[in-house]
Image (cartoon, rainbow, N blue to C red):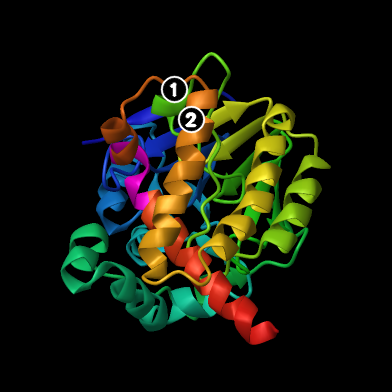
């Protein structure tokens, strides 16, 4: 069922219904009679995107750009189906991400190894390729013109080496995919949004991520458009929490380095860390409610820290 949030400045957050309502969104950006889509959701999201376009009176041929922030499938899983439905759109992606959307077999196989075949089909349906001639690999600082509205693509490694963010000067907002973390509405208190960084496997790099966050702040954004979930304001007041988490994650990982059954230990250590922070943030949800909201993220973050530990050991 179509659900969306109008955010002003010609920007709409579209609910992707990934796992649960309020977990993931993608964005429609309108400028006059032209439009762009930032992130795509999964194949299950594409009919809702097309329904919203029709509701807004936007013909498929008026969508100029499809811009996945990176190729993780909650962000780009529907790219193939969406591009098939938008006959004149070009897909913009980081150069390292482009081959995975042109030939998605490897990224699909990687996701199946995380979720399993049955859960993969349930979550993502199928991953279709995008024709190479419709894919533009964008360099850091590349700009596109959307009917006079300039969108700037920024390389933003840390969560993934193939990640980009999109700066929209018109709104003063930055579309950050996973780079500015997660902020689920259910965890917001009087202290503001509760920020969580996703150390999802397999390219988590805390040192690089620190630098990326600092670079994003040089644009002086007044709003961040998160994939997980929707828009948050006053990012300069929130970025310190993300830097603190980037310092904490390696310490958490190393504390479990010599533990038997390390992956469950990492997940337990992450819960200890975040439950303390949730208490300090004034969150009144029960542990069961917290697990419903953050359970999948804690599991994936633990897997990412496990990969980071293995990579760090090889580098010594």
Main SS, magenta region, reads helix
Query: Does label 2 or label 1 sit earlier along the sequence?
Result: 2
Seen in the picture, residue 18 relative to 72 is either above or below; the reply is: above
Q: Secondary structure at mark 2?
A: helix
Q: CA distance from mark 2 to mark 1?
A: 5 Å
For residue 4, side relative to residue 174 (left or right): left
194 in the magenta segment? no
Residue 147 in the image: x percent, y percent? 65, 42
The magenta region covers: 292-296
Residue 265 in the image: x percent, y percent? 41, 60
For residue 233, side relative to residue 30 (left or right): right
Q: Which mark is residue 278?
A: 2
For residue 288, side relative to residue 304 (left or right): left
Q: Quadrant of residue 43?
A: bottom left
Mark 1 — residue? Answer: 283
For image coordinates 35% across by 64% down, the residue present is 84
Is the C terminus in the top left, top right, bottom left or bottom right quadrant? Answer: bottom right
For image coordinates 67% across by 60% down, the residue present is 206
Q: Secondary structure at mark 1?
A: loop
User: Pointer 2 and pointer 1: residues touching (CB < 8 Å)?
Assistant: yes
Is the N terminus in the top left, top right, bottom left or bottom right quadrant? Answer: top left
For image coordinates 54% across by 36% down, the residue present is 30
For this rendering, which residue is in front, 257 or 180? Answer: 257
């Amino acid at each position: 069922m179509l659900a969306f949030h109008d955010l002003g400045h010609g920007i709409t957050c579209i609910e992707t219904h990934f796992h649960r309502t309020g977990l993931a969104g993608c964005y429609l950006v309108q400028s006059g009679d032209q439009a762009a889509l930032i992130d795509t959701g999964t194949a299950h999201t594409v009919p809702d995107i097309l329904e919203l376009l029709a509701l807004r009176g936007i013909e498929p041929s008026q969508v100029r750009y499809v811009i996945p922030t990176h190729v993780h499938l909650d962000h780009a899983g529907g790219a193939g189906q969406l591009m098939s439905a938008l006959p004149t759109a070009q897909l913009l992606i980081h150069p390292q991400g482009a081959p995975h959307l042109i030939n998605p077999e490897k990224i699909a196989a990687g996701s199946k190894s995380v979720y399993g075949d049955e859960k993969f089909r349930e979550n993502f349906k199928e991953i279709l390729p995008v024709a190479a001639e419709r894919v533009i690999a964008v360099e850091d600082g590349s700009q596109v013109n959307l009917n006079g509205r300039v969108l700037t693509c920024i390389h933003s490694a840390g969560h993934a080496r193939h990640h980009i963010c999109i700066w929209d000067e018109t709104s003063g907002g930055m579309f950050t995919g996973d780079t500015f973390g997660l902020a689920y509405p259910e965890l917001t208190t009087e202290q503001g949004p509760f920020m969580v960084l996703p150390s999802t496997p397999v390219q988590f790099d805390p040192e690089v991520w620190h630098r990326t966050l600092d670079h994003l702040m040089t644009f002086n954004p007044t709003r961040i458009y998160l994939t997980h979930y929707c828009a948050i304001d006053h990012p300069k007041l929130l970025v310190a929490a993300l830097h603190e988490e980037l310092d904490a994650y390696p310490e958490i990982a190393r504390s479990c380095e010599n533990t038997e059954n390390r992956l469950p230990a990492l997940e337990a250590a992450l819960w200890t860390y975040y439950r303390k922070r949730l208490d300090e943030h004034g969150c009144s949800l029960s542990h069961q409610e917290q697990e419903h909201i953050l359970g999948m993220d804690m599991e994936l973050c633990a897997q990412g820290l496990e990969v980071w530990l293995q990579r760090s050991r090889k580098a010594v």
